[in-house]
Every structure is written in structure tokens, then in C-alpha cells.
């Protein structure tokens, strides 16, 4: 059965400092880049 209540501690929240410390900023930059490349590929008829 799926859980109806959220998992994890009730007081947790998103923290930008944690993104920087864990070096996840690279992912934040890579996702729009990859999306843009896919969009460009579709528009140029690569698929």
C-alpha cells in the first residue's frame, strides 16, 4: 500500500546551501543544457 503521509522528518525543507555543499549545482546547470539540446535536436529534425 502506498503511504499517504509524507516520508522523512516533518521539519525538513529545501536549502540552497546544501545544493552548493553537495556540488549539486552542476546538475542544476546540466538539466537546462540537456533539455535545450534535446529541443534543438527535435527542431532540426534529428528525430
Image (tube, rainbow, N blue to C red):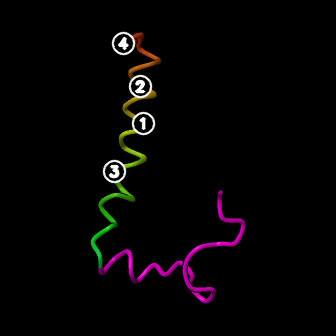
Range drawn in magenta: 1-21
Q: Name the residue under label 3.
A: 30
Q: Are marks 2 and 1 in contact (CB under 8 Å)?
A: yes
- Element under disc 4: loop
Report if residue 9 lies within the magenta region.
yes
Q: Residues within 10 Å of mark 4 (few under 14, many from 20)?
A: few
Q: Is mark 2 on a helix, strand or loop?
A: helix
Circle 2 crowding by C-alpha within 10 Å: few under 14, some 14–19, many from 20:
few
Give whichever of discs 1 and 4 has the lower sequence position: 1
Residue 19: percent from left, percent from top? 38, 74
Residue lying furthest bottom: 11
Q: Residue 6 or 19: which is nearer the viewer?
A: 6
Residue at the spot of label 2: 40
Q: Which mark is residue 13?
A: none
Task: State the residue lying farthest toward the front.
Answer: 1
Residue 5 position by quadrant: bottom right
Using a 10 Å C-alpha cutoff, classify the residue at mark 1 as few (fewer than 14 neighbours), some (14 to 19) or many (20 or more).
Answer: few
Residue 22 on image: x %, y %? 29, 76
Horizontal side of residue 38 vs 26, given as left or right: right
Q: Which of marks 3 and 2 is in front?
A: 3
Looking at the image, residue 12 lies above or below residue 5: below
Amino acid at each position: 500500500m502506498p503511504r499517504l503521509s509524507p516520508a522523512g522528518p516533518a521539519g525538513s525543507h529545501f536549502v540552497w546551501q546544501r545544493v552548493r555543499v553537495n556540488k549539486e549545482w552542476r546538475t542544476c546547470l546540466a538539466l537546462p543544457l540537456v533539455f535545450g539540446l534535446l529541443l534543438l535536436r527535435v527542431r532540426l529534425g534529428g528525430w
